[in-house]
Image (cartoon, rainbow, N blue to C red):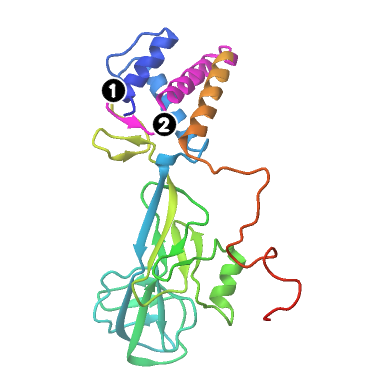
């Protein structure tokens, strides 16, 4: 188990030769305040130093949708007469007779009415409408997405993306905008998919968490705030990085401290995850058809 914040500060102050506190959180001593701030700064910066194993998490969710009815005209952006707008918001796309591609909810006006982003080309009374959620919020501790982990788990297909702005507009506005594969994009604070679904499709991806600190009860945190907090980083890296930052803040020579910190960091990164064995003389496999098992002539004979 990782050392607590108090234990890490105690180790750092003992090595620095400054007074060791009996408590850190709420301590009014300026040195203790600075060391805690520098230790938190170390935690923030270490997020970017490596793809730490304990910060990689999986997010799985089902697509959301509502099949309902409503009334609308060609001269108004409002859909009325919806039995219930509960659960609807601006993350939903609208599919129904007359609605152009990529029509979204602009606002939920009441328990029975919404305003949409585009006019319908048809006037419909009590027609069937599909509200498909296409924008999904990131987890609370989201920091960055892991490439090539986006999958449609229902169909066992990898999702295609991330699409850039130009490709996304082509999907939303072009003549050919759908296909058997789901496209995805990071848009604002959302994981956005295309097309939408009127069924519960299971989707998922892996992401990097920013919750490098943990409370005594295991709650994910983004900084040290309580003496009993722990972190996912190796203790020695946190202590050495805090000492290095302390010397930098005081204007002292950091040559030796930087060398010790860098050596420890590189070792910890190398040991944090496993790695594949790479051959200097790889041989092609012979399980599937390839150039090593197809005849030069006489195909099919």
Which of discs 2 and 1 lies nearer the camera? The answer is: 2
Q: Position of residue 111 (x, y in %)?
A: 25, 75
Query: Along the horizontal axis of the image, is 68 left or right of 74?
Result: left
Q: Tell me the distance, in whole angstroms, between the alpha carbons under discs 2 and 1.
A: 23 Å
Query: Along the horizontal axis of the image, is 9 left or right of 246?
Result: left
Quadrant holding the N terminus = top left
Q: Position of residue 237 (x, y in %)?
A: 46, 25
**Which secondary structure lies at badge 1?**
loop
The residue lying furthest to the right in this view is 296
Q: Position of residue 154 (x, y in %)?
A: 39, 69
Tell whether label 1 touches label 2 (CB within 8 Å): no
- Bounds of the magenta segment: 228-255
In the image, residue 272 above or below residue 14 = below
Residue drawn at (41%, 81%), measured in percent from left and top?
95
Residue drawn at (49%, 83%), measured in percent from left and top?
100
Query: Along the horizontal axis of the image, is 200 left or right of 193?
Result: left
The answer to whether any part of residue 57 appears in the image is yes
* Residue closest to the eye, 238 or 124: 238
Q: How many labels, in total?
A: 2
Which corner quadrant of the image does residue 70 belong to? bottom left
In the rendered image, residue 32 lying in the magenta stretch gets the answer no
Residue drawn at (56%, 12%), measured in percent from left and top?
252
In the image, residue 50 above or below residue 137 = above
Residue topped by disc 1:
26
Q: Earlier in the sequence, mark 2 or mark 1?
A: 1
* Residue closest to the eye, 281 or 86: 281
In the rendered image, residue 247 lying in the magenta stretch gets the answer yes
The answer to whether any part of residue 30 appears in the image is no
**Which secondary structure lies at badge 2?**
loop
Residue topped by disc 2:
233
């Amino acid at each position: 188990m990782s050392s607590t914040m108090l234990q890490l500060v105690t180790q750092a102050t003992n090595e620095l030769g400054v007074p060791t506190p009996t408590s850190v959180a709420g301590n009014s001593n300026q040195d203790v305040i600075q060391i805690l701030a520098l230790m938190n700064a170390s935690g923030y910066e270490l997020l970017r130093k490596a793809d730490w194993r304990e910060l990689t998490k999986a997010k799985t969710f089902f697509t959301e949708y509502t099949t309902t009815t409503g009334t609308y005209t060609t001269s108004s952006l409002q859909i009325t007469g919806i039995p219930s707008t509960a659960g609807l918001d601006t993350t939903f796309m609208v599919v129904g007779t007359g609605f152009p591609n990529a029509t979204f909810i602009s606002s939920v006006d009441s328990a029975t009415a919404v305003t949409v982003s585009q006019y319908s080309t048809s006037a419909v009374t009590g027609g069937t409408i599909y509200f498909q959620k296409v924008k999904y919020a990131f987890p609370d501790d989201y920091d960055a997405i892991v490439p090539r982990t986006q999958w449609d788990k229902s169909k066992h297909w990898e999702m295609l993306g991330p699409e850039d702005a130009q490709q996304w507009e082509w999907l939303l506005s072009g003549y050919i905008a759908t296909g058997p594969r789901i496209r995805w994009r990071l848009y604002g604070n959302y994981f956005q998919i295309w097309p939408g679904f009127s069924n519960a499709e299971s989707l998922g991806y892996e992401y990097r968490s920013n919750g490098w600190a943990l409370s005594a009860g295991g709650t994910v945190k983004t900084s040290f705030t309580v003496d009993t907090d722990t972190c996912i980083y190796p203790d020695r890296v946190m202590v050495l990085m805090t000492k290095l930052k302390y010397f930098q803040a005081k204007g002292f020579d950091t040559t030796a401290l930087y060398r010790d910190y860098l050596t420890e960091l590189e070792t910890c990164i190398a040991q944090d995850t496993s790695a594949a064995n790479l051959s200097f003389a790889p041989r092609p496999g012979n399980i599937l058809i390839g150039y090593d098992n197809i005849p030069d002539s006489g195909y099919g004979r």
